[in-house]
Image (cartoon, rainbow, N blue to C red):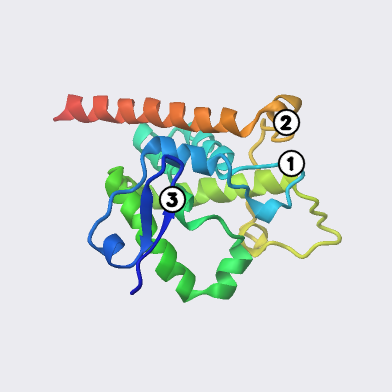
Amino acid sequence: MTDQWLVTADGTDQPISGYQLLIGNQAPRIEVIAHSLAQINRFTGHATRPYSVAEHSLLVCDIMAARGLDHHAQRAGLMHDAHECLAGDISSPAKWVIGVPWHCFENPLALMVQKQYHLKTANTAYRVDIKTADLTALATERRDLMRFDAQRNAPWGVIDHPGAEVAPMEGVDLNNPARIAMTWRHHRDAFLARYRALDAQCKVIAGATA
C-alpha cells in the first residue's frame, strides 16, 4: 500500500493511507479538526447557503442533548464525522456508487480518530442514537436548506422510507438571519468550545466514578 498524506491546517504531514496509517499514526489535534470541518461544506455545495460539517455536527449534538442523552453520547455525536477532516465529505449517493473502496479508505481514518479521542466505547454504546440524530439532522437540513419539493423530487430513501419516515427537528431554523450572518470561524470556534466543554464533563464524571 502506497503511503499518501496531506498537509493539515497546522502544517503537519498527516498520513491518510499506507503503512504509516496502519502502524497507528496520531489523529489531528482537535483545533485542526474544528478548523477543517468548519470549511468543508455538506451536500456538495448545493445547500441554499454554505453549510459546513462543523455546523452539522453541532446540530447532531444539539439533537442528542434535546433527547436527554448524556455527555459521552453528545461528545460522540459531535465527533461522528471528525474523520472527514482527512477523508473529506462526499455525498451519500457518491459513497454508494464507490462502494467498498470508499469504506476501505474512510473506515481506518474514522477508527484512528475514535482511538485518539477515546470514542470507541461511546460510539458502540450510542451507535443507534447517533444514527437517529444524524438522520434527524439530515431531515432538518433538507427542510431548511435544500431546494427539495416532494411533488417534484425523488424521495430520499434514508429519511422517506414508507412507515419509517424521519421528521425534522422542531424549533430549529437553519436559515434564520443569525445563522446566515455567521462565518466559518463561528462554527469552528463553537465546535471547539463544545468539544472542550463535553470532554471536561466526561472527565469529571469518569473521575467521580473511578
Relative vertical location of residue 16 with respect to residue 31 in this rendering, above or below: below
For label 3, the SS is strand
Quarter of the rendering occupied by the C terminus: top left
Q: Position of residue 45 (x, y in %)?
A: 70, 51
Quarter of the rendering occupied by the N terminus: bottom left
Q: Amino acid at mark 1?
A: Arg
Q: Residues within 10 Å of mark 2 (few under 14, many from 20)?
A: few
Query: Which residue lies at the image location 50% right of the left edge and 38% below the top edge?
Result: 35
- From the image, tell me which residue sits under label 2: 180
Query: Which residue lies at the image location 57% right of the left edge and 51% below the top edge?
Result: 135
Say whether disc 1 or disc 2 marks the residue closer to the N-terminus.
Answer: 1
Q: Residues within 10 Å of mark 3 (few under 14, many from 20)?
A: few
Q: Is residue 138 visible?
A: yes
Say whether disc 1 or disc 3 marks the residue closer to the N-terminus.
Answer: 3
Q: Position of residue 191 (x, y in %)?
A: 49, 33
- From the image, tell me which residue sits under label 1: 49
Relative vertical location of residue 206 with respect to residue 17 in this rendering, above or below: above
Q: Are marks 1 and 2 in contact (CB under 8 Å)?
A: yes
User: Which circle marks residue 7 in the picture?
Assistant: 3
- Which mark is in front, 1 or 3? 3
For label 2, the SS is helix
Q: Are marks 2 and 3 in contact (CB under 8 Å)?
A: no
- Which mark is in front, 2 or 3? 3
Relative vertical location of residue 74 with respect to residue 108 in this rendering, above or below: above
Q: Give the CA separation, mark 2 to mark 3.
A: 30 Å
Q: Position of residue 163 (x, y in %)?
A: 64, 60
Q: Amino acid at mark 2?
A: Ile
